[in-house]
Amino acid sequence: MTESTGKINLLGLTRLEMEKFFESIGEKRFRAGQVMKWIHHFGVDDFDAMTNVSKALREKLKSCAEVRGPEVVSEDISTDGTRKWVVRVASGSCVETVYIPQGKRGTLCVSSQAGCALDCSFCSTGKQGFNSNLTAAEAEGSIKWSVIDRWPTHEGLVEAFAQNIEAALQKYPKELRDSVVLLYSAHSLPMSVVNRGDPYPAEVAATVWAVQQRLGHRNPYRLCWQSQVGPSAWLGAQTSDTVKNLVKKGQKDLVLIPIAFTSDHIETLFEIDQEVIHEANELGADGRVTRAESLNGNMTFIRGLADLAKAHLDSGEVCSRQMGLRCPGCTSERCLESKKFFLGQQERTNDAVTL
């Protein structure tokens, strides 16, 4: 129970404690699972937003309970990207949460105590002595979440793809090089997903266009789609059909680029290398259908990811504005609540961005 409001803070309760709480207010134990999912899965702290809970129960919860993390007193960002938050807990003490970027990784330090009993001479917290352990609510509430939800034309991504394509083209005779057709191959989607307005095809196409611009549009190209499964309609044209049709028409010089993949796996090593290219050779391609390397450990790509993450953290942005807009035909509550989770981490200037 918090001293400031007299209400039960549900943020720090275990499953068993939550079930006992609901029994104590005359409700069924299963309500604990419903509310805990809203709090811990979706990051919701407003009872009115818990739409699968009855209005009567929401009103009851508002009268006797709350979901409240500790107060963030200050935030500091150093020149090397380190971010420090000072958080005030219920006892009145302050603790620190620190994010430290370290090359290809980052370290997040989350306090579990106010003060420290170790008394290390170099540590200001240790000099305070031990004050108290943090409650579960205080420890969890000191973490802020954000997401990099889209980056189809990021410079590092585009440059890495372009470098791998240029390396693949070098294997063709100079006099033929500019006539090689580039086939960008992305994982397909069921047309039911496309027709409800999913932005994936447009964003993949944006990557392709950006790569083509970087390459100077020297080669003709097409975007095609692979990995269709099942009897339902999928987005096409299919990669395998595209390769067969071009080879049959005499266009044998093709470079396949796995554009929506960042590492090798069954869809590159088997589906493209062992199936699509093998079938092309059986039709008379004579080994002239090849594949550009996947990004894998490409250092340009890795540096691009690091730059992307740093710029995102420096911006303080929780997610892009596009993240909040649902597909026009979307009816998935899970999708809606994931968007609400991230949008709920920041102050919104337009409540209509989640539809």
Image: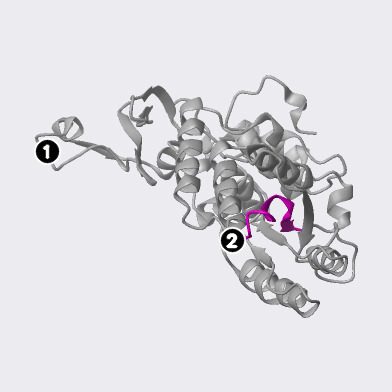
Bounds of the magenta span? 171-188
Q: Badge 1, how many Cα within 10 Å: few under 14, some, many 20+? A: some
Side of 251 relative to 342 (left or right): right
Whether residue 229 can be seen here: yes
Q: Is residue 239 above or below residue 18?
A: below
* Residue 53 part of the magenta-drawn span: no
* Residue 173 part of the magenta-drawn span: yes
- Farthest left residue in view: 121
Q: Position of residue 219 (x, y in %)?
A: 72, 47
- Farthest top residue in view: 349
What type is the residue that disc 2 sits on? Lys
Provide the residue designation for mark 2.
171
What type is the residue that disc 1 sits on? Asp
Viewer-nearest residue: 8 or 260: 260
Q: Position of residue 97 (x, y in %)?
A: 35, 35
Is label 2 in contact with label 1 (beta carbons under 8 Å)?
no
